[in-house]
Image: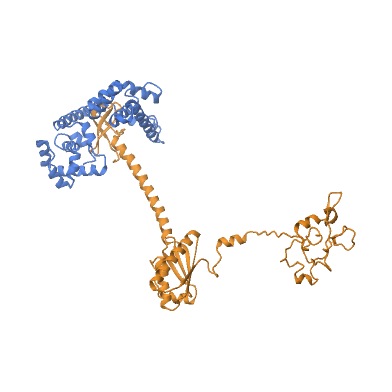
Amino acid sequence: MEKNTTYLVVETHSAYAVVLDSGGRFIKTANPGYTVGDTTDRIVPLIYPQDRKHKRNAVIRLAASLAACICLCAFGIFEYQYMFAEYGNVHMQINPEVEISLSRSGRVLDVEGENADGNALLENYDYKGKDKETVVDELTDRAIEQDYLAEGGQISLFVDARSSSWASRVEQELLDELNRHLQDHDIVVEITVGSPAGAPETDESLQILDEPQKVTIPIRPADGEDSEDDAKADAPAPSDDSPYESRDDGMTDYAEPAASPSSPAVPSAPTGNDSGYDSGSPYNDDNSESNSGDSAYESVGNSPYEENGDSSYDDSESSSSYDDD
Amino acid sequence: MDGEHDLVEQVYTAKKDTEAADSLIRRYMGFIRAETAKYLHRAPVEGQDEELSIVMLAFYEAILGYEKNRGAFLSYASRGIRSRLIDYYRKERKHKKVISLYEPVQEEDSETMKIDHLEHPDNEIEKSHHRAATQDEIREFEKQLAEFGISFSDVADNCPRQERTLQACRRVLTAAREHPELLDELIRTKKIPAAALSDISGTDKKTMERHRKYLVAILLAFTNGYEIIRGHLYHLS
């Protein structure tokens, strides 16, 4: 609307007046008491229902357009990542080692040789715009042509990716594809899939190894051929034989044990022939090594664990390694 | 129930007939005043409270926009009135600049008041003569429009509200003013020489047909005899 617009009242009704503005528009406006022929410079124009609807529709259209743009952008980003962002790698070992970078859709983004033969295999090879199956087939063909792969040869495939399910699916697809492809060539080749010996450790495995490890090793009496039941039956009362003797004051003193090749944490001296170790134990009497007399668990001789069932850790013996003093 | 049904019938008649609309508005002046009083917190005074004219306009807008599926007419009108008054108060707050007539025109000249610069009362006579002449001309214009079966209300309803369409109609007017024989043809045949005007102005015939009533009115205003109205249309000169 032009500046300095004035309005000439040309018709009046009870609810509205018709005015002619200086730009040639006829407008219905509120009638605060106009008479025909009056001139005014300010009006309150009538809003037609269709204009109101048009305005509302325009707002809806704008909102819908914005929503469509956002959806399009989101879809574009997703599609870009699906098609062009690296998602996983296929390590293909014939003798030439080749690494094929894949997008999530299976599109080949890059191919690199991992050794000299791999580089030789990829020389003048154009992988652009090809899918993973085509590239694997073509590299196999090239390997056959360049005598890297012959009857009875081996192809190893390993896929590492962010998603293990995706990796295993790709492995399976490539395996099926190679089988089909090599059948056409009438050549028998062994194809293995999965982690190769020299494959780098995945983040997941590294994470597991990073965690603090706790191993509990049960230590049992290492003497004689007696069964565990006998050992339980013959075991002396803890008050007599235990190196952890309790006192009236409620405190347990841990006396310094005598030097011993076995674990110093042996809780009590076993009696008789009972042993926690089975016949295969290196501490068994039958074992020639233990019979030599070097073992602390010898049945005779210098073992502190005597065969007769009496503990060498007797209170009366001054030579006891677990002395009360 | 019958009363509500009658009212809906009257509203549907009033949509097309301005006289019926005026009649309906007069009959529901009590409702209109009551709605205005809700916002003014007092009885409105006709000719003094602008809110009353806004509420009447909103009531008329409700007549034009009402559909049977929108519930009872009076509650529909009440909602429209409320929205219109909220819009009005919002706009008024923006333009609320009250200037006293008893403040100096310039700060250094404290003796000359703004009221001294108002037009002399003697000019009222001249203004009254001018108004009478304007009214005569408008009446004559109205009569001539009636010969085409058109009223000012029809013209207002048919007036283009989009700037692009308005510009197209202005091109038609410019073409007609450059070829006065086409204006004579309009008066003689009571029909717009659409083909000739479309060729000259480049405006689509369909656009001209869609805004026929408006074009008749604006073309008639530029025929002989409407000097005051033409003088008012200074943005078209």
Image quarter of residue A144: bottom left
Can you see residue B230?
Answer: yes
* Image quarter in which the C terminus of chain B is found: top left
- Residue A124 coordinates in the image, percent (x, y): 40, 75
| Chain B display color | blue
Query: Height in image: A217 above or below B43?
Result: below
- Residue depicted at x 13% and y 31%: B147
Rendered position, A95 above or below A43: below
Image x and y of residue B170, in percent: 21, 42
Whether residue B112 is visible, yes or no, is no
For the view shown, which residue lies furthest in the bottom direction?
A: A147
Shown colour of chain A? orange
- Viewer-proximal residue, B128 or A106? A106
- Residue depicted at x 20% and y 34%: B229
Is A263 situated left or right of A77 in this image? right
Left or right of residue A185: residue B185: left
Q: Nearer the viewer, residue A233 or A296?
A: A233
- The coloring applied to the image is by chain
> What residue is drawn where x is 14% and y is 37%?
B223
Q: Nearer the viewer, residue A101 or B202?
A: A101
Q: Quadrant of residue B212?
A: top left
On the image, the x and y values in percent for residue B104 come to 39, 33
